[in-house]
Every structure is written in C-alpha cells, then in structure tokens.
Amino acid sequence: MSAGEGGLDVPRAAGVELEGVTKSFGPNLALDGLSLDVPAGEFLVLLGPSGCGKTTVLRLVAGLEEPTRGVVRIGDQVMNGVDPKERDVAMVFQSYALYPHLSVRRNIEFPLRSRHVDARERMRLVAEVSSALQIGSLLDRKPAEISGGQRQRVALARAIVRRPRVFLMDEPLSNLDAQLRVEMRAELVELHQRLGSTILYVTHDQVEAMTMGDRIAIMNHGVLQQVDTPEKVHDRPANAFVAGFIGSPPMNILAGVVEPVTGDTAPARSPTPADRSVGGTDAGALVSVGMPGGSIPLGGPLAEAVLSRGLASVIVGVRPEHVSIDPAGSLAASVTLVESLGHERHVVCRLEAGQLVVARLAAREAVPRTGERVSLSFSAEHLQLFEPDTEARIDV
Amino acid sequence: MAAESHPGYGMRSHRSTLLRRLLRYVLLVATALVVAFPIYITVVNALLTPQQIAARPPTLFPLHPHWGAFASAFSTGHLGIFLRNSLIVTVTITLAELVTSALAGYAFAFVRFPFRRTVFFLCIATLMIPMEVTLVPNRETIVALGWFNSFPALIVPFLASGFGTFLFRQAFLGMPGDLRDAAALDGYGHWRFMTRVVLPMNRPVIGAFAVFAFLSAWNQYLWPLVVTETNGVRTVQIGLRQLQALSIDQTNIIFAGTVLAALPIFVILVVFQKQLVRGLTAGALKG
C-alpha cells in the first residue's frame, strides 16, 4: 500500500480543539474542564480506565453529545450546536455498528447515499476502499456472514469511504482476538500514515496506546492527566496515576516518610559500581525515605528537591525493570509470585506492610523461589518522586 | 468412533432417539387433530344438508357435497356486503395501526422529549382498561360527533394501538444503540434512519403485529354492533349473527357463512405464517 496508489490519500485532515470542555450527565460529571489541542494529521490516543470520560470526548467531537460548558472546534470552526452530519467526522464503533439488514456493499455506501453521491461514483469509491482493506470479495455478503475481523474492516471502510476530516475510533479492536488485534494495530498505523488524517482513538489498552499514538492523552475521572508522546509519558509521567497506569507491568508506587540522614547513620564504605543504585548503598545520601521493611537513601538533585520543598512524606515510583533483587538491598520483602513470560520474569514481592513491588528480570537471571525472603534495591537514576498531596511529579 | 468399537451401544442410542422422535410426532399429530377438528367439521357441515347435519351418527366425509349453502349465504345473508365492509374497516385499521405504532414506538425509543416516560406510561395504561369499560362513553362520543352508523365510527377509534406502540418500542430499543449514532454520523436524520434502518431491521415484529391487528379488527363484534344499525356499514361478524337468526332451520348456511367469514384470516395466516412465528419468537431466539 504505497501512498500514491488509489485516490484515498486526499489530504483533508483538520485539527480538533477542545477548550475548557465540561460535560455532566445529571449529577455525574463525565468531563471536567478538558482542554486538548489535536493538530491536523495527528494520531492521538485517549487512554484511561473505563468510565474516565474518554468515550465522552469522542461523542462530543462527533456531535452525539453537546458540552455542558466549553468549546469544541474542528479545523478552527466552532462546532457547538452543529449537527453530527455537518461536522464531517466519521466514527468507528466498538460494536462496529454495521447495519445487519444491508450487504457489505450497501453498508459501505450508506454514508454516500445520504450525501447523494451518484451511482457510478459510489461504485468507484466502494471498489477503491474495499480493495485497500481487502474486503472486495465480501461485498455481497451480510454482516452476519463474515468474521469479526472482516466486520472490523467493513466498519473502517464505511468510515474511510467518505473521507472525513477527522476519524473517531472507540476501542475498535477490543472485540478482536489477540493475534488479529496485533495485525489490525499495524494496519491502522499504516492506514493513518497513508491517509494523513486526524485520528482520535479511544482505548483502555496501554499497549495499543503506546504502539499506535503520536501522542497519548491519559484521562482519569474526567480529568486530563497528561498529553505527550509515548516515550515522555512512560519516562516522565506527570503524576502518580499516569505512572501507575503506563507500563507493563506498571510502575511500582510506594508511599514513604522522609527522614534526614545524619552523618553517623551512613556506614563508611568504599564506593563500588553498585553505588549507582539506591537501597543498597547510601554514600552521599542526603535523606532517606522510610517505608515498611526498610528505607531507601536519596542523594543528588532528587534529595535536594525533597528538602527544598520541605516534604515530610513523598510518593516513590520505580518501574519494575529498575527494581533488582540484591543481597545488599535495604528493603526487606518476601516473594509471593514469580510469573514467567518466556523472555522475562516478573517477581512479585510483598513489603512488610503488605504493599506489592514487582521486579522485572531477564529470563536468564537467577530467580528466587516463592516465599523466599529477599532484599530489594532500586536504580537511583530511574526513581521518580511525586508530591504526597497532589501526586504531581517532583521535577528535578 | 464409539459406534465402531461398541456397535450395540450405538444402535441402541440410535433406536432410542428414533422412538423419542416418534413419540413426539404422535403427540403433535394428536394436538393438531384436537385443534383442527372443529374447523374441519365446520367445513364439512357447510357441504351437507340440514338433515344430514342433524343425523346421528354425524357424517364426517361428505361423499356428495352440496355447494349451494355458500350461494345462499350470499343471497339470504347479504354476506357480500358484510365481507366488503369488514375488508374496508380491517385493512384501514391495520394500515393505520402499523403507521401510528411505528411512529410512536420510534419516538418513544429514539426521540428525547419532555415527559417521555409519563406519556409512554399513559400509552400502555390503555392496555389495562377493558374495552367494555369504555364502550358506553365511546359510543356517546361517536353519536355526539355525528358518526353513528358510519365507517368513521368503526375505524377512527382504532387508528392507534397501545399494544402496537409498546411492541414496536420494545423491539426498537432492542436494537444496538450504536446504530443510531452511526446513522447520525452517516448523515441520516430521524425519518431516514427510521425508514432505512429501523423498519427494515424489524420486519418480523412488524409482520407479526400486522397479522395480529388484522385478526383483532376482523373479529370485532361488540363495538360494530353498538355503533351501527344498518347493513350498509355492518361488518361480517354481525352478518353471521343475523344469518344465524335468519336460517335457524338451515344450519348448513350458517356453517357456510362461518367458513366464508374465516377465509380471509386463513389466507392471511398462511401467507404471513413465517413472519408471525419469527416475530413471536424473535426475542427468544436472539437470546
């Protein structure tokens, strides 16, 4: 599928902008003051747990709902009060929403017929889009007579055939089996590159979000938490929620009490390569963060940030790949579960107060047995700290 | 495979399913006979003379059928006019109920308007009031409107149906909600969504209701009796009653009239049988 073939790639993408959008359904606040700017041609993934308001965003852009407050713009035009059919957006539904009494061809043609496209042009457009999506041989079948993956393609074809300015996709892959989902993921990305269109894509699957999105908007309880590239969202999460939501397995989030380090509590030792991790050695530590089972020493800019803010407690985030099982570690834990994924293992450890910490180890590394007592240490340079009240990331 | 290694077992299980199937068909045939016998005997009696009907034991197989009773039903009983009247009334009511129930059912299912639930409740509340309760006030209304003894008196009170509205609303609500949204984005307003998507998708229910509406309208007796007084507008069920009074000694004519009055319903049932069964079992099958 090269960019030049067919006539699908007419660039008519438009940007989408939401400004202070609030939406409530009776007493329930679905969206709270959401501002989001999606430039034309971007693949933006809306990610969050169910009920976080991400589908509401799509419905507001589509015009299926009107915002309680705030402004929705598509291509610089204010869309509040504009009928869905005038907005020039197409939506792909989780259920596909194909018309069961119509053939695949009639389903794809459906939006064209409402726009009074003449029969010959309709034939041409359907042929073009169905060959691009490899459903040309299914045109005379009914939706009930084709597979889930094929229905997904028909739903996509129906969206693409009228060349909307914006595509809205509401968990389009969630009804497919795992293997098909991976295939369709790649195809959707390719399709986006080919069409150059703006796509707002809703999912609760962070793997989909990380692999497909130009940027990811993470939402929770109707509030936008962070919008950024997959890398930034992963490496520099804006708050503890994002940190705990992104990553597989997600980041370990631990509450700790800040304790200043006095000179004599730090045992003198000669520096070793292991000094690059915390929890093991504490040479140069300015503060330590106490948690059940021990404490982890903090040094450098992180410690300075904690001290300068005068925080008495702090939330520590550490990704499983930065947790190691280390005899010199300063956090005591017991192993509750070892999951093997073939190429890696996840060791689930329990701290004294019952908090779980997951360590991700390569398959070749020695792994403790379930029930074994271990010591954990965290890689210092990858530690993330969050404010205890706002859960916002402490930048250093 | 199991049958190969244990031939006896396979044969026995085969025999028991056969036996069970046989038993099932015997039961079905017996039930069918019980249901069909009165209909059969009505047709047979229409073909016999009054003396043959009165004779005991009864004649079950008319070897020399007399077709004259059918002609007499038309001439003595004026059945032609009654059948025509019934057809006019029934077809109009059926079409009107289909249109109004589909529109109202659609509105209750897809259009947001104030007091929607209250209005819908009022609508289905009409189902709980027996027709006999409203008979007298409704007749007064018809008389006051000057419609006594006219087709409007027979038709207008039945232009809308609480049952049809309820049935269609439930069927429409059973459709996936995304379809309305998809159609809205595809550029289809309420009218075109209804005619292009909702109605075609619900053909079985609509067919079933059409048959039901036809049957109820065709079989009406009490209401037509109290709002009409001349044969020019009276319907076939009243015609039958008159026929019975006219030909007390000619029971074969009464039977012939009954057969003629039931004929349109028979035709409708045969034609729409598939739709009716699908409509009645649609919910059960979809699961």
Image (spheres, coloured by chain):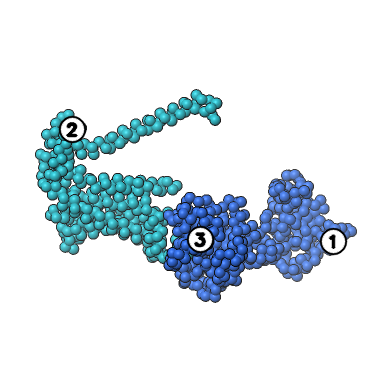
* Quadrant that contains the N terminus of chain B: top right
For numbered disc 2, what is the local secondary structure?
Answer: loop
> At label 3, which amino acid type do we have?
Ala
Q: Given this view, does label 1 or label 3 mark the residue nearer the observer?
A: 3
For numbered disc 3, what is the local secondary structure?
Answer: helix
The location of residue B164, given as percent across then percent down, is 32, 54
Shown in cyan, the chain is B
Q: Give the Cα distance between marks 1 and 2.
A: 118 Å
> At label 1, which amino acid type do we have?
Ala
Q: Which mark is residue A127?
A: 3
Please tell me in which quadrant of the rendered image residue A229 appears.
bottom right
Q: Mark 3 and mark 1 in contact (Cβ < 8 Å)? A: no
| Left or right of residue A71: residue B228 | left
Q: Which mark is residue B63?
A: 2
How would you rate the neighbour count of disc 3 (Cα within 10 Å): few for under 14, some for 14-19, many for 20 or more?
some
> What number of labels is visible?
3
Q: Which chain does the numbered disc 1 sit on?
A: A
For numbered disc 1, what is the local secondary structure?
Answer: loop
Q: Residue at x 17, y 44 (%)?
A: B257
Q: Report the residue marked by disc 1.
A: A283
Q: Is residue B178 visible?
A: no
Q: Which chain does the numbered disc 3 sit on?
A: A
Q: Are marks 1 and 2 on the same chain?
A: no
Q: Which mark is residue B260?
A: none
Q: Are marks 1 and 3 on the same chain?
A: yes
> At label 2, which amino acid type do we have?
Leu
The location of residue B280, given as percent across then percent down, is 36, 47
How would you rate the neighbour count of disc 2 (Cα within 10 Å): few for under 14, some for 14-19, many for 20 or more?
few
Shown in blue, the chain is A
The location of residue A178, given as percent across then percent down, is 60, 51
In the image, residue B16 above or below residue A7 = above
Q: Give the Cα distance between marks 1 and 3.
A: 70 Å
